[in-house]
Image (tube, rainbow, N blue to C red):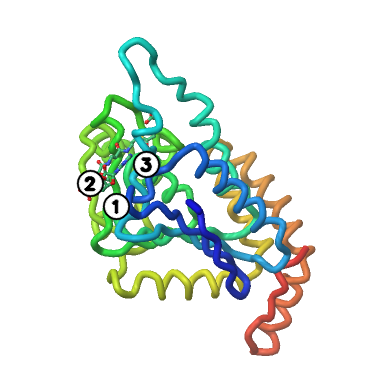
Amino acid sequence: MTILVEKHSGYRAIILNRPDRLNALTSEMGRALLAVLDEAERDADCRAVLMTGAGRGFCAGQDLTEVTPTADRPPDLKPLLDGYNAVIRKLHAIEMPVVCAVNGIAAGAGANLALACDIVLAGKSASFLQAFARIGLIPDVGGTWILPRLVGAARARALAILAEPLPAERAQEWGLIWQAVDDDKLMNEAHALAARLAKQATIGIALTKRALDAAETNTLDRQLDLERDLQDEAARTPDYAEGVRAFLEKRPANFSGKR
Ligand code: T3D
């Protein structure tokens, strides 16, 4: 199995599992990733996802043995990328938080898969490599969209064009990821975070994701209207009532994550 799923209380861990290839992606893995995210979404008890890689790497991007071009026949990358793009869209749309634990090198499509997750932790020995320029390609799987938004135009351009690895601590400093943590603490911290998120107000988090994504293209005017509408939706969830009650009663909230 190239994608493993572990069911934990309240959340699922999704593990890229081709450690001998640094979890390089194949089209089959793209389809499997989408399927396990769909399953997580259908599971009413699943309120968060944790994504990571098996072995010493997170993901080395596209498996280059699957798409080796020949002189007479260039590869048709569009179906392959449509498959990966569906995963990126799903990570944004899925109505629960997605944590990524980057346990080693995240290169090419693997880097941009990690950056599509909501909260990215990385081991201090991990690094992020927009490897595409090294093989004559452009950053894909959302790379050209997410990089300038996270680190600004100048750094995005240099990362994309120079294709040099960015160590995890520098990635945190630049705002590319949430946190770099000691390697030996990474998985414990990532699981603790997923477990904590699984007890939060899931619909409120989902609506927050939607609002932040829409803000990338909205005017202030449109965004204010959207916030009003999504807040109205959030306020109708039982978790809002529970959150306010818990505050007034000076006790921890017991959120259901339901609409
Ligand atoms: O046509 C298209 O490609 C369309 C899609 C594009 C999306 C993309 O993701 S393009 C970018 C593809 N990825 C890369 O170009 C990165 C290639 N890998 C590397 O540059 C290096 O492996 C790393 C910098 C990521 C890690 O280096 P290192 O020294 O830690 O490990 P290694 O020895 O290079 O790799 C370990 C094994 O994994 C090795 O196999 P071996 O020699 O032990 O049998 C290596 O060949 C294999 N491997 C690593 N990356 C890939 C791979 N095999 C296939 N595809 C890979 N991407």
| Label 3 packing within 10 angstroms: few (<14), some (14-19), many (20+) | many
Which residue corresponds to the image point at 49% horizontal and 37% vertical from the top-left? 27
Query: CB under 8 Å between callouts 1 and 2?
Result: yes
Q: Quadrant of residue 232?
A: bottom right
Q: Position of residue 10 (x, y in %)?
A: 63, 72
Q: Which residue is mark 1?
A: 105
Q: Residue flagged by tag 2: what amino acid is it?
A: Pro
- Sequence-earlier tag: 3 or 1: 3
Q: Would you place residue 187 above or below residue 216 in this image?
A: below
Q: Quick check: which quadrant has ligand 1? A: top left
Q: Indicate if the residue with disc 2 has its beta carbon within 8 Å of ligand 1.
A: yes
In the depicted view, which residue is nearer to us: 188 or 171?
Answer: 188
Residue 22 relative to residue 170: left or right = right
- Sequence-earlier tag: 2 or 3: 3
Q: Which residue is mark 2?
A: 165
Q: Residue flagged by tag 1: what amino acid is it?
A: Ile
Q: Indicate if the residue with disc 1 has its beta carbon within 8 Å of ligand 1.
A: yes
Give the spatial CA distance, label 2 vs label 3. Answer: 14 Å
Q: Residue flagged by tag 3: what amino acid is it?
A: Gly
Q: Would you place residue 148 above or below residue 21 in this image?
A: above
Q: Which residue is mark 3?
A: 61
Q: Indicate if the residue with disc 3 has its beta carbon within 8 Å of ligand 1.
A: yes
SS at mark 1 in the image: loop
Q: Position of residue 104 (x, y in %)?
A: 30, 57
Query: CB under 8 Å between callouts 3 and 1?
Result: no
